[in-house]
Amino acid sequence: MTGRIRNRQFASKIVSAEEAAEMIEPGENVGMSGFTGAGYPKEVPGALAKRVATSHEQGRPMKVGLWTGASTAPELDGALAEVEGIDLRLPYQSDPVSRAKINAGRLDYTDIHLSHVAQRVWQGIYGELDVAVIEVSGITPDGRLIPSSSVGNNKTWLEQADRVILEVNSWQSEHLDGMHDIYYGTALPPHRKPIPITHPADRIGVPHLECPADKVIAVVETESPDRNAAFTPPDRTSEQIAGHVLDFLELEVRSGRLPRELLPLQSGVGNVANAVLAGLGTGPFDGLTAYTEVIQDGMLQLIESGKLQMASATAFSLSPTAVDRFNRDTAAYRDKIVLRPQEISNHPEVVRRLGCLAMNGIVEADIYGNINSTHLMGSRIQNGIGGSGDFARNAYVSIFVTPSQAKNGDVSAIVPMVSHVDHTEHDVDVVVTEQGLADLRGLSPKKRAERIIDRCAHPDFRPLLHDYFQRAQHSSFGLHTPHLLDESLSWHHHYVQHGSMRP
């Protein structure tokens, strides 16, 4: 037995990453751990990519289905995509190599609400799960698995896979033990029971993952860090967006629609989200909580300042500096952070019950409040919908944020009609850009259009949007949601043809 592997039966199965990769057969579906660059296997994917490349060189094509929690890292997604080793990728990705292969039609990808993945796998929608490759931070003497820096779909992979390969990563803090809450009470209809969470701090499961030792075919020892990308410091645009959001929250408190400590926060990943969190750190709100997907730098800082009492998530997404701080003081965070399976962290029932305040980034919004959060010009996938739909549809208030323009002013984030719909107007309460905030609640479509154009569109595009909207009110087939169908996507077409939405 070694330091992190304290069970003899598991210790007897230690092999190299290359030996473990040989146990994965061509055409198999492989469920790997990993969520936003945290807790993904560090060695087996690279060894598998080398095996795939060798097989191709020998004239023996080899691909696997790759299922994860969300995005992973270049040494997993990128390495396997580079060698044409992926058949079907799900449920979310952010790797540039994978993205290029998907948009070139060389890699199949299905983009899924993250709360739906476990249920669909249990239903057998994607076929059998042959192998699970899961990173853990340790194995207890009685054979339980201590999760690492993400949980994601690991519980489901371990339950559903025919065979399991474990990576035991000693880089992960040993003080993670006790931070996780793995709930084993989910079921398919008609056997479902309520998820008994009424506060983000509630623990309803056990701290460890379970897996029969006879299902484990290999254990690989690693000591490698997560992929931790540094966040760009908030720029003027991000700070302006954050300011509008904070002003809105203060107004909601004064109106009596929110308590002074707000409601549980959900925040997507990115610089704007961190700018909002930074603003909360200096704002008037205390006793905050979070029920979200990922804990990023801003939330860690809020915990350290005492503003945030508890954060529930499924993974971390931290900069290198924040990771160092967290790993140094992991034990101190253990009663402030709980990591759950993503089917619980994103569960619509819990999100609705807690009344989460959802804040997510977008690609574009149209004048009626429909949101595109995944596609460029309607056809090129960026990353995926992730958990934004899980939260937006069920949030107490659903807020979407974006700079008003992109590509040095050649692209407007506010358009006549979105080129792809991820969130319909029915799931969108508030749209925010650096120009201002549009509260769309209670408004008819035409009133929403006026507010979004006036408050969110960039001044360079605002007159064009007003012109489109006014002409649509005279020439549209119907006047409830006026559109000029021969013009509604002309801005996108003009960009594809000329590299700019400007006429």
Image (spheres, grey):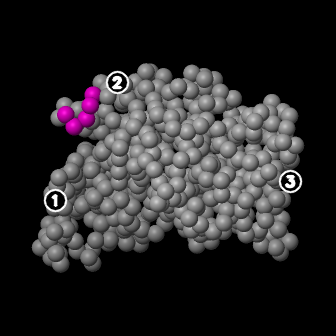
Q: Amino acid at mark 1?
A: Ser
Predominant SS along the magenta part = loop
Identify residue for label 2. 286
Point out the residue furthest to the left here: 474
Residue 50 in view (yes/no): no
Determine the secondary structure under disc 3: helix
Categorize mark 1 by other alpha carbons within 10 Å: few (<14), some (14-19), many (20+): few
Is residue 121 shown in magenta? no
The one of 376 and 393 positioned closer to us in this rendering: 393
User: Is there a contact, CB below 8 Å, between mark 3 and mark 2?
Assistant: no
Q: Amino acid at mark 2?
A: Asp
Range of the magenta residues?
Answer: 256-260
User: Which of the 4 quarters of the picture holds residue 328?
Assistant: top right
Determine the secondary structure under disc 2: loop
Identify residue for label 3. 19
First in sequence: mark 1 or mark 2? 2
Residue 444, label in figure: 1
Q: Is 266 positioned to the left or the right of 84 in the image?
A: left
Categorize mark 3 by other alpha carbons within 10 Å: few (<14), some (14-19), many (20+): some
